[in-house]
Amino acid sequence: MLASFFNKSKPINYIAVGLYMFALLSIAHYKKGFVAEIDSILVFLASVLLYIVPMLLLHFIIQKNDLTNKGTHTIFLYAFLTGMLPNSLTSLPILLANAFLLLALQNLMYLRNEKYIKPKILNASICIGIASLAYFWSIGCIFLVFLAISYFESKDYRNWIIPIIGVGVVYVFANCYTLLFYDSFFSFVAHIDPVSFSFQNYLIKEQLFSVGILSICIFFFLSLFLIKFSRKAANLRPILRLIIAYLVLTLGVAIISPEKDTSELFFIATPLAIIGTTYLEMNYSQFVKEINIWVFLFIPFLMLLF
């Protein structure tokens, strides 16, 4: 039943996934200690917006670039993977950074059309720069821009300079903001987060479960994706390499992040959901597929409620 439901791409599918995500977000905020005060309500509403709208953007990206079949498996997997990380659902900086990284990915995907190359590179770089203001180590995704340039438009040397200009533009506007409201210059050095390779927090029971499930998904989904990679259309392979690179970079961000409370793993959800869709779209037993989807549906609730 659910397997056939997510094979379709109708408004009811988006509503269902959106309600599922809203329920996960609400439980996460409640468990953190939600208080019915104006500040908490505004934070919650902003979280809803920054959590659900990127899901719609993700669906638009994959459909526009023919990365998957015309279903809603990807956004369902995105909801499942992010639902495994309740600490990220209550973190506005993480949700904001993720939204801008998705906007950057959208611009990079359009580079293969070979139109308006420079504006798209600039837009992607600015989006990543803004994301780094919310969560500093997301700046690592700027390497994705250079990789996209190498795939689609490497001959023009000016394209290699644009990402630096884009990040510089963000720095200038950050200075304008701090000068206007705080009468001081934006301190880039003070904004840099430290690097930490301590994974002690992952040994906590709740976080260990999330990390364990995500590790299994990464290994299983990526293995199948790489096996199927050679069967993909040649014109899609550069974009699919970008998705793999995106996953590797976001894993790198998680590894060096200073406070490992699993919220730093949130950025992995976007590329992993795209990669994992390959598994749900494979031809195998409908009964097994149905069980898989029900398991994906309930695991976040089990973790949040117990």
Image (cartoon, rainbow, N blue to C red):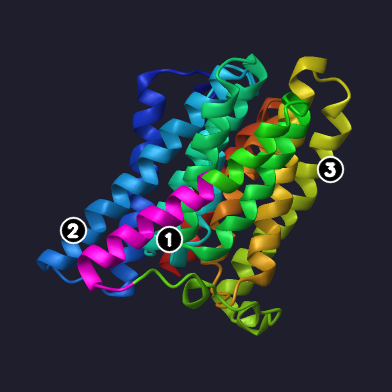
Q: CA distance from mark 3 to mark 1?
A: 32 Å
Rounded to the nearest angstrom, the CA distance separating label 1 from label 2 is 18 Å
Residue density around tag 1, few if under 14, some if 14–19, many if 20 or more, within 10 Å: some
Image-quadrant location for residue 121: top right
How many discs appear? Answer: 3
**Which of the marked residues, 3 or 1, is nearer the chain's N terminus?**
1
Q: Which residue is mark 1?
A: 134
Q: Quadrant of the C terminus?
A: bottom left
Against 188, residue 161 (above or below) is above
What are the residue bounds of the magenta stretch? 166-184
State whether the magenta stretch is mostly helix, strand or loop.
helix
x and y percentages locating residue 296 in the rendered image: 57, 46
Residue 39 located within the stretch drawn in magenta: no
Q: Which residue is mark 3?
A: 223
Q: Report how far apart the C-alphas of labels 3 and 2 lie in the structure.
A: 41 Å
- Give percent across and percent down for residue 65: 61, 19
Q: Amino acid at mark 2?
A: Leu
| Residue at the image position 45 percent from the left and 45 percent from the top | 100
Which residue, given by chain and number where applicable, does mark 2 sit on?
42
Going by the numbered disc 3, the residue's amino acid type is Ser
Instruction: Report the residue at 66% width, 33% height from top.
Output: 159
Kindly state the secondary structure of the residue where label 3 is placed: helix
Q: Amino acid at mark 1?
A: Ala
The question of residue 180 being in magenta is answered with: yes
- Sequence-first disc among 3 and 2: 2
Picture quadrant where residue 113 is located? top right
Task: Report the front residue among 283 and 258.
Answer: 258
306 relative position to 262: left or right: left
User: Residue 224 bears which disc, if any?
Assistant: none
